[in-house]
Image (spheres, grey):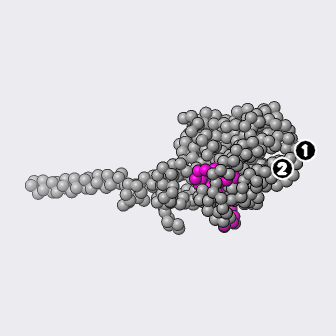
Amino acid sequence: MRRYLRVLLVCMFFALISVLYVFSQLASSLETPAGASGSDPQQRAAFHRGGSAHGGRKAPGKPGPEDQHWYNRYIMRKPDSAESGRARDELMHLAVVACGQRLQETLTMLKSAVLFSGRQLHVHIFAEDQLHASFKEALEMWPAPFRSKLNYTVYPITFPAENAKEWKKLFKPCASQRLFLPIILREVDSLLYVDTDILFLRPVEDMWAFLSRFNSSQMAAMAPEHEDPRIAWYSRFARHPYYGKTGINSGVMLMNMTRIRQKLFKNDMTPVALKWEDLLMPLLQKYKLNITWGDQDLLNIIFHHNPESLFVFPCQWNYRPDHCIYGSNCVPAEAEGVFILHGNRGVYHDEKQPAFRAVYEAIQKFKFGDDPVRSLLGPLEERLLGTTHTYCGRVRHLFTKKLAQSVSTMHRDTPKGR
């Protein structure tokens, strides 16, 4: 009998040891996520965020949890001392997407941004691979007083691998890249996206100031596509939902991307609200046969269902040929002038709208360090006199009203020298 009791006690002892061992292993696995063994708390936090923190990226060519995400091809550079602390909080972020023959147009846009702005600007340039060296070469040749106002990062064009061809051919090559900026630039809180055919006629910081006017639900800002619903494209021809009465134009788009990443968007595909990255592809699949203007149409659909999330700024912040081609219809511009010029339809490069082309070529040809009154504003005003045979030329004073103020400030504050 005693022999059986001893055997029973030994068995109970080993069973107890086994149970304690199992519990210790379970507790250990809960404390350290798989694939992050031995990492410190900061590394574990980066792992849970998909490696979005500085220093949380894997080395190139090494396997890691980020491999499942197409957008982790992008590696944000470590901020230098000028961008740390409060300076980084005040930095304005500008993004542009350039493909094909858009190099000079993009450089002219960037030139207008730097000429009239007084604050530091970080530009995120998404471009086809063959353009990267040309961008770097051109920007590094800018004179130091102007070059010092701009930091830049050049990125490749990339779309989700399983649908890359479909996204790239949507509307214009690479145009839909802008839809993925909140996903790619995860460390950027707010961003101003502009098309390559944009010209700033007043400081970028004035547009940036709209961020402070967002209410608690707003996360993006754009201008109306048109001012008059009776002749607007969306109200007459669209075969999909669109924002408001005339739709919105995405050529100038200011975003609080932190809010965009956090929001669950209402939609007409499912009763369940979706995150931004989960919304885009289903939206394209549903509407791809009904959209004309590509990614802009998708943005119209999104904000049609989420109108509380959009801030609409006036038309002089995205002034296009439609605002004057058949007569002036942008009332705010008539009162205050044009703030941002948008030369869509290729008007900077043909003779259809010579007033737009005149502004573009005046900025393009202006040499850094020259007197902006004599070398930019004066020649432009003289050339605009020859555009009065067009409706846009008849309101030529709108093109120079705000520009004259910007040039005056630039003339007073900008260091001379090339």
Image quadrant occupied by the C terminus: bottom right
Quick check: can you spot residue 327?
Answer: yes
Magenta stretch containing residue 125, yes or no?
Answer: yes
Instruction: Look at discs 1 and 2 and give the one toward the viewer.
Output: 2
137 displayed left or right of 30 = right
**Which disc number belongs to residue 298?**
none
Q: CA–CA distance between discs 1 and 2?
A: 15 Å
Q: Which residues are magenta?
A: 112-137
Q: Position of residue 186 (x, y in %)?
A: 54, 51
Q: Is residue 232 left or right of residue 417?
A: right
Q: Amino acid at mark 2?
A: Glu
| Residue depicted at x 45% and y 54% | 46
Q: Which mark is residue 382?
A: 2
Please check the rendered image and state whether residue 69 is part of the magenta-colored stretch, yes or no.
no
Location of mark 1 (residue): 389
- Asked if residue 51 can be seen in this view, the reply is no
Residue 155: quarter of image? bottom right
Question: At which x and y percent is residue 226?
Answer: 76, 37
Q: Position of residue 298 (x, y in %)?
A: 69, 43
Residue beneath the point at 67% across and 53% down: 115
Give the amino acid type for the residue marked by disc 1 in the picture.
His
Secondary structure of residue under mark 1: loop
SS at mark 2 in the image: helix
Q: Earlier in the sequence, mark 1 or mark 2?
A: 2
Spot occupied by residue 24 in the image (x, y as percentages of width and height): 28, 54
Question: In percent of the image, x 75 and y 42: which residue is there?
Answer: 401
